[in-house]
Image: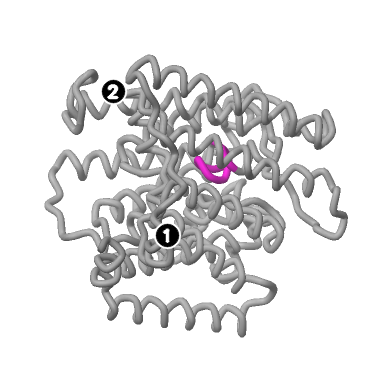
Amino acid sequence: MQSANYTRSADQNAVLTVSLAVLGISLYVQQFIAGMQYLTFLIGVGLGITLLHAAFGFSGGWRLFIREQDGTGIRAQLLLLGITSLLFFPILGQVFPSIQAGAALAPVGTSVMVGAFLFGIGMQLGGGCGSGTLYTMGQGQVDMLITLTFFIIGATLGTAHLHWWLSLPGYGNISVIEHFGWWQALLLQLVILAALYGLVRLLEIRRHGRINPIKWQVPQHEIAQRFIHGRWPLWWGVIGLAVLNLATLIVAGYPWSITYAFGLWGAKIWAAVGGDPGSWVYWGSGYPGQSLNSSVLEDTTSVMDFGIILGAMLAAALAGKFAPAMKLTRTRVFTAVTGGLLLGYGARLGFGCNIGALVGGITSGSLHGWLWMVAGFCGGIAGVHLRVWLKVDKPMGVQQ
């Protein structure tokens, strides 16, 4: 029976170790850190489990569509955007005054366009997006540790230069919720997402004569085992991520984000070795200045990122899917380093990654999220061709 295989594959020692770590950290944060940080940490754990069990990522889905016009991953992403918008727009439109939450708004301009394009290239070279880097590293993939290291370096460099990029042509924050009203904006958004879904579906049918369904059902006798040990159908991942993003909005007061923490970690490391990031415009005032001078556990994004890594570790242990030791080639090290730098720098210029800017921005009704999606996908196309040029992948037109 397949379900029995899931049970036998679980690494019980690793499950116990990671579970104790999750419990210990959550208790420590609850006891010594003000606010609801322990809840955001546990939400992060849930996100890590969901991402790994559903194998939900952006870079691989984009690459499959660009190379082979297999739209399964992109259609799942569009469904995530639609469902999350349904959950977010009424709250951000103040239908429920008791819920105090803010949108992920950012300026629409050159900085976002360039940053998202660089991030799109970095996703393909680095082998993961913002969320993908965290959960695959939690799974034990050594190359992703390299990507994350240079992701942090790139994000830190981005904070040093962001003020210059923001001086280039652009507009301020543009919220369609504020402009149209929440339900009119939601209707418009759902129409656009449905049109994109239909386009992806049409291109997939033209190429393959059919579409791969986004699965929901599993045999009834496997439901419990699949839920605990994986692998989840994509629909489970879509629903799980939407619900946990809603929980983040309610508990933290703003949508799920990832990459702010990387710049913060890099700035703190730079300060620890004698640098002065506090003299940079970005870290000189406001929340960045406050977080630079506070415990990293007081930063919600950092706490959630730690939770994602541990959640992915726990899911990998439950599924027996810790990545085996791998031989790192020079090409893979090069793409991990280059991709990580582009990911970090692009994320800071673009006010977030595929989660904070694309998902968070679009589902908040921020126009910069749509600009990020277009520019990021264009960067993804360039990145896919670079992978071929570097001989990481086979030539276009040849199945992987």
Is residue 288 toward the left or the right of residue 215 in the image?
Answer: right
Q: Quadrant of residue 240?
A: bottom right
CB atoms of marks 1 and 2 within 8 Å: no
Asked whether 367 or 15 is in front, the reply is 15
Chain part drawn in magenta = 350-359
Q: CA distance from mark 1 to mark 2?
A: 42 Å
Query: Which residue is at 71% across, 36% downward?
Result: 365
Image coords of residue 216 (percent x, y): 46, 47
Position above or below: 184 against 253 = above
Report the front residue among 281 and 35.
Answer: 35
Q: Which residue is mark 2?
A: 385
The x, y position of residue 230, in whole percent, is 36, 60
Q: Residue at x 36, y 28 (%)?
A: 70
| Numbered circle sitting on residue 62 | none
Indicate the amino acid at tag 2: His
State the residue lying farthest toward the top.
206
User: Residue 148: x and y, percent?
Assistant: 36, 52
Instruction: Check the picture and name the quadrant holding the N terminus.
Output: bottom left
Query: Which is nearer the eye, 255 or 84?
Result: 84
> Which numbered disc flags the more N-terminal residue, 1 or 2?
1
Quadrant position of residue 204: top left
Q: Amino acid at mark 1?
A: Gln
Q: Provide the major secondary structure of the magenta segment.
A: helix
Rendered image: mark on residue 220: 1
Instruction: Residue 329: name its quadrant.
Output: top left
